[in-house]
Image (spheres, rainbow, N blue to C red):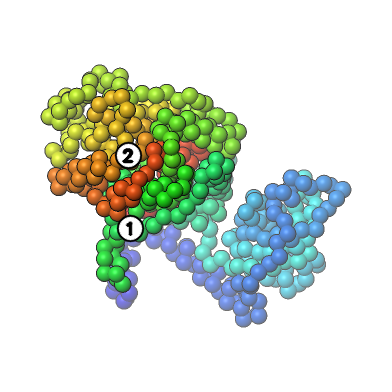
Amino acid sequence: MNNSQEKDRQQDIPADQDAELKILNDQMQRRIEERDLLSKEGITPYPYGFDVTAHSTPIIENFQDDKPETVSVAGRIMTIRKMGKASFFHIQDTAGKIQVYIRRDDVGQEVYRVFKLLDIGDIVGVKGYTFRTKTGEISIHAEEFMLLSKSLRPIPVAKEKEIDGKKVTYDAFSNKETRYRQRYVDLIVNPEVKETFIKRSAIISFMRGFFTSRGYLEVETPILQPIYGGAAARPFTTHHNALDMELYLRIANELYLKRLIVGGFDGVFEFAKDFRNEGIDRFHNPEFTLVELYVAYKDYYWMMELVEDLIVETCMSVNGTDTTRFLDNDISLKPPFRRLTIADAIGEYCSVDIRDKSETELRNTAKDLGLSLDPKMSSGKIIDEIFGEFVEPKLIQPTFITDYPTEMSPLAKKHRSQEGVVERFELIVGGKELCNSFSELNDPVVQRERLESQAKLKLRGDDEAMVVDEDFLRALEYGMPPCAGLGIGVDRLVMLLTGQDSIRDVIFFPHMKPE
């Protein structure tokens, strides 16, 4: 950037932001000077390692006044009170915070001088013994001290003031967008955020154990696919140079998992990163985690019961209860869940009957309800639009919505006793879809007809319609046993069980618009 460009850029910065930048630049410059001073004196600001034997919270929880313990800890300086010959500071490690007392006569004059050059945000190692201060705080008396990483950029530090007898926090790192963009800072200064992601890991771990304990095999299937399928969604497209061919990031792993059922596995599942080229909002991220399960010789009735067990047991495992608080609602996850066909649900909440209606009639019904529809929408899309607008948001307690129109579910088996619908359910909780399941279609002739019908919808302009996958059809022609399939949105399940109201709060690094 030349001088004129830099001048133009500075003119675009508001005065208050310009002042903040100057303060930041001054602080960083001072830290860089401290780093350089340490290096010149032969003290590396970035050594190679440190022997950690203990962590903050267990030290505090297990402390006994009559049994001081020798410990070696490491963490980031979060508060610091520098005094003459002795100082106090708090370090934050993976488990929490603990205070450290450091004295020049214990660690030596040179080491103490290094300490006096340090700042909030620097990462240090401490070896010493535990004790309780006069104020009652369990702390570590440092006998050895070492700088492990010099922080060049100051971390935001929340401050408290007492106003009218109440503590008021200011300068907190609380802006949502900044927190999502700089999750590393968010985790440092808002350590409670870690708990959501620790619980996310526990949820996935429990689900994995739930499936494997029942004998199902965890597998991996391709992320880059020559033909996308298994869901109604727009894919991301890329190009393979060596093969000179277009490839797609998977929108689902369904069709590959069914190939494995054809191959002879009775139960397979996969925790998959899937990608859909769609909008971003509180419940959608273009890259998301989905777990899919396929079990031979079962149907969607059996799968409903499995889902009830899975959801409530996962909640009990991570929360210790069968209830959760989500979007200001107390939700009971205790089975059995309510079951309602999509036609009955629309009838109950919209007072209209969609059964046996033509596309024109459905369009008129939607218009009467106040919906403005894309003229390219087919019957299935119109029903989905009515349900999504008027019914889904009202389904707070767990509800299985079942028996969808055939056009909406080209991979599901036709209903055994009702015409025009398939054996499919979605689990709606807190007003949002959480699971999707079919009695899987295994008739290759019917499956071809369904996919060809989808291809016609694509020609009409439905860019989310499925495409014909000849290799998948070939696999079905070898014979696939009766099968129940299930897909669960892991991110949404984590939202539900941790009480978060945005998908961005349960994904470490959500996609954002460019800064």
Camera sees residue 199: no
Up the image or down, 474 lies above or below 152; here it is above
How many other residues sit within 10 Å of disc 1, few (<14), some (14-19) or many (≥20)? some
Out of 307 and 51, give the one closest to the viewer: 307
Among numbered discs 1 and 2, the one appearing first in the sequence: 1
Q: Quarter-wise, where is residue 408 in the image?
A: top left
Task: Please state which of residues 173 and 384 is positioned toward the viewer in this rendering.
Answer: 384
Q: What type is the residue that disc 1 sits on?
A: Gln
Residue 353 location in percent, x, y? 22, 20
Q: Secondary structure at mark 1?
A: strand
What x and y, as percent, mark residue 450? Answer: 23, 41
Task: Answer left or right for 16 relative to 386.
Answer: right
Q: At 29% from the left edge and 49% from the top edge, which residue is drawn?
A: 473
To which residue does mark 1 refer?
225
User: Label 2: which residue?
Assistant: 441
SS at mark 2 in the image: loop
Question: What is the three-letter code of the residue carrying label 2?
Answer: Leu
Which quadrant holds residue 89?
bottom right
Q: Where residue 449 appears, x then y in whole percent?
A: 21, 42
Q: Is residue 64 above or below residue 20?
A: above
Is the N terminus in the top left, top right, bottom left or bottom right quadrant? Answer: bottom left
Q: In the image, 126: left or right of 47?
A: right
Q: Residue at x 43, y 37 (%)?
A: 297
Which residue occupies the foreground of this view, 164 or 364?
364
Which x, y percent locates residue 67? 85, 50
Image check: 134 left or right of 184?
right
Density class for disc 2 (Cα within 10 Å; few <14, some 14-19, many ≥20) is: many
Name the residue at 22% across, 23% down.
355
Asked if one can make out residue 105 in the rendered structure from this viewpoint, the answer is yes
Taking the image as shown, residue 457 lies to the left or right of residue 275, namely left
| Labelled pair 1, 2 in contact (Cβ < 8 Å) | no
